[in-house]
Image (cartoon, helix red, strand yellow):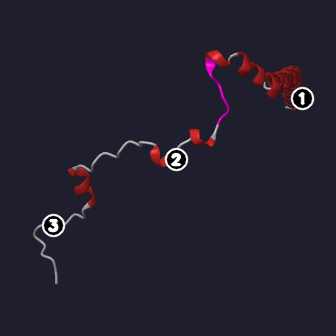
């Protein structure tokens, strides 16, 4: 009986060692993947910074003014004025559909025709 207990303990110890071995390599793989994702995030942040700088460079007011002057004959661009906007009252929103008979009967309370109203 004693040897059976020792054998069970040794087998359990080997099983736990195999589990710890697998967990160690799974953890190392997860750490490697995480560092790769962090490098990718850093690269994307740097790319985003470059794109923001390029956007700011392309949208300089003096550059846009030169483009407007250069293409005025073709595009006829001009400054935006408040008179170019309308109130919301001028928007033609679609009308809701008229209620159908089914909708009206659904709203009415159900009454039994045999019942008479009580005064």
| Cβ atoms under marks 1 and 3 closer than 8 Å | no
Horizontal and vertical percent position of residue 2? 88, 32
Q: Nearer the viewer, residue 29 or 52?
A: 52
Quadrant of residue 66 within the rendered picture: top right
Residue under label 2, please give it.
87
Label 1 to label 3: alpha-carbon separation: 84 Å
The quadrant of the picture occupied by the C terminus is bottom left
Give x and y (percent) for residue 81: 64, 39
> What residue did someone put label 1 on?
6
Q: Which mark is residue 112?
A: 3
Mark sitting earlier along the chain (2/3): 2
- Image coords of residue 6 (percent x, y): 89, 29
What number of labels is visible? 3
Q: Nearest the camera: 93 or 8?
A: 93
Q: Nearer the viewer, residue 73 or 24?
A: 73
On whether residue 84 falls in the magenta region, the answer is no
């Amino acid at each position: 009986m004693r040897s059976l207990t020792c054998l069970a303990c040794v087998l359990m110890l080997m099983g736990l060692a195999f589990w710890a071995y697998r967990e160690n390599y799974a953890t190392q793989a997860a750490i490697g993947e995480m560092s790769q994702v962090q490098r990718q995030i850093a690269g994307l942040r740097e790319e985003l910074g470059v794109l923001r700088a390029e956007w700011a460079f392309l949208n300089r007011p003096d550059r846009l003014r030169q483009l407007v002057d250069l293409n005025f004959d073709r595009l006829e661009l001009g400054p935006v004025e408040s008179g170019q906007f309308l109130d919301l009252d001028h928007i033609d929103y679609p009308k809701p559909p008229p209620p159908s008979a089914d909708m009206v009967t659904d709203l009415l309370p159900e009454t039994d025709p045999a019942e008479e109203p009580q005064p």
